[in-house]
Amino acid sequence: MEMRHKQTSGMYESRFALVRATTLEDVVNARASHPDSRLLGGGTDLVVNIRRGIVAPPVLVDINHVEEMRAIRADARILEIGAAVKLAELDVHEGVRRHYPVVAQAAGCIAGPTHRRQSVSRHALPLL
């Protein structure tokens, strides 16, 4: 599903289509159809950069409702973090806390609580 948006702020205008993906297939199809698209997880960096006129992607693919991209798997052998997992979710996940306490601790220390509830881990993990 695509929706057209027009944002205006200050001296620039940004127009983009929004694809609200609900399955991995939706994401793959959207990226194949729109190679210049950007994935929208938490949006804390991307939306700010759009508003500032730093980037102007023609299409945003919202991945927040794709179950596989919100999954966390953490056991003694593996840590898998979906691209749309919020830092706050990572911070409190029982398996992450038990087997990867440094990751959980770091997720709980990045930015403030409001930002952690919105920010996706795929942007913050390089900071660890």
Image (tube, helix red, strand yellow):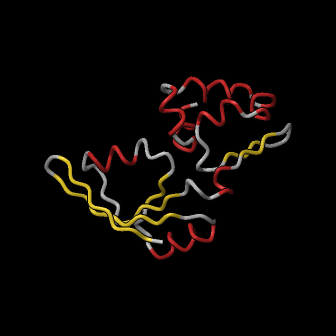
Q: Residue at x 60, y 50 (%)?
A: 83
Count the labels in the image.
Answer: 0
Q: Is residue 59 left or right of residue 62?
A: left
Q: Position of residue 34 (x, y in %)?
A: 43, 72
Residue 52: image quadrant is top left
- Residue at point 28%, 47% (across, down): 51
Position of residue 111 in the picture relative to residue 90 (left or right): left
x, y (%) of residue 47?
Answer: 37, 47
98 lies above or below 42? above
Please state which of residues 29 and 115 is positioned toward the viewer in this rendering: 115
* Residue sitting at x 35%, y 61%: 57
Closer to us: 70 or 125: 70
Residue 30's place in the image compared with 45, above or below, is below
Task: Answer above or below: position of 70 versus 60.
Answer: above
Q: Position of residue 23 (x, y in %)?
A: 63, 66
Nearer to me, 9 or 74: 9
